[in-house]
Amino acid sequence: MGTKGREMVGEHADRIIELLNKAYADEWLAYYQYWIGAKVVEGPMKDAVMAELLEHAADELRHADLLTTRIIQLGGTPVLSPKEWYSFTNCGYDPPEDPYIVPVVDQNIKGEQCAITTYHKMMQETRDIDPITYNLALQIVSDEVEHEEDLQSLKEDFKKILK
Ligand code: FE
Ligand code: FE
Ligand code: MG
């Protein structure tokens, strides 16, 4: 976005860029957590879990793309180095050390719940100052709500199969 577009957010640009960069770090970590989870996951229904994890990984990478586009529009610099992801992240990273389907899905549910909180807060903070970022957060949080639901319904299926 050019100068007029940036004028719309005025003095709030730095704060909005900070929020976007924090979410951007979250998305890369979420992407990797899903991606590596899909590689190592074990147990009954492994194939169904793997397919869901890979689908979500692709969504998280798409979210990172959307966020970086907005950061650049606002005149900011997206986090340039993976080692900075840990200092920016809101939601952190859980390595799938226990590859069994249940802990892997639980770790990702926790991540989705944190993502929902993060984007909900981003919406509250940008509602009156940056409708474009507000709309972006709304778009992303809709996916995160779907992700949480998908993983929780996988867990319901585990209960049926594991009893
Ligand atoms: Fe995401
Ligand atoms: Fe997600
Ligand atoms: Mg899904």
Image (tube, rainbow, N blue to C red):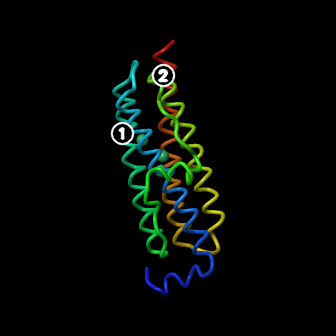
Q: Which mark is residue 14?
A: none
**Of 19 and 141, which appears nearest the observer?**
19
Q: Up-down: is 28 above or below 52?
A: below
Residue that protrudes farthest toward the top in the picture: 163
Ranked by sequence position, the earlier of labels 2 and 1 is 1
Cα distance, mark 2 to mark 1? 19 Å
Circle 2 Cα neighbour tier, 10 Å, few/some/many (<14 / 14–19 / ≥20): some
Which residue lies under the disc numbered 1?
54
Residue at image position (58%, 62%) is: 19
Q: Quadrant of residue 125?
A: bottom right
Q: Is residue 100 above or below residue 31?
A: above
- In the image, residue 141 lies at what x, y percent? 53, 54
Q: Is residue 135 above or below residue 158?
A: below
Q: Residue at position x 48%, y 33% from top?
A: 95
Element type at mark 1: helix
State which mark lies toward you, 2 or 1: 1
- Element assignment for label 2: helix
Q: Given the image, on which type of amino acid does mark 2 rest? A: Phe
Label 1 is placed on what type of residue?
A: Leu
Classify mark 2 as within 8 Å of ligand 3 or not, answering yes or no: no
Q: Quadrant of the N terminus?
A: bottom left
Q: Is mark 1 within 8 Å of ligand 3?
A: no
Q: Which residue is mark 2?
A: 158
Residue 8 quadrant: bottom right
Q: Quadrant of residue 68?
A: bottom left
Figure quadrant, ligand 3: top left
* Furthest-bottom residue in this view: 4
The percent position of residue 120, horizontal first and vertical second, equals 62, 56
Q: Is residue 111 left or right of residue 72?
A: right
Q: Residue 121: x percent and y percent?
A: 64, 58
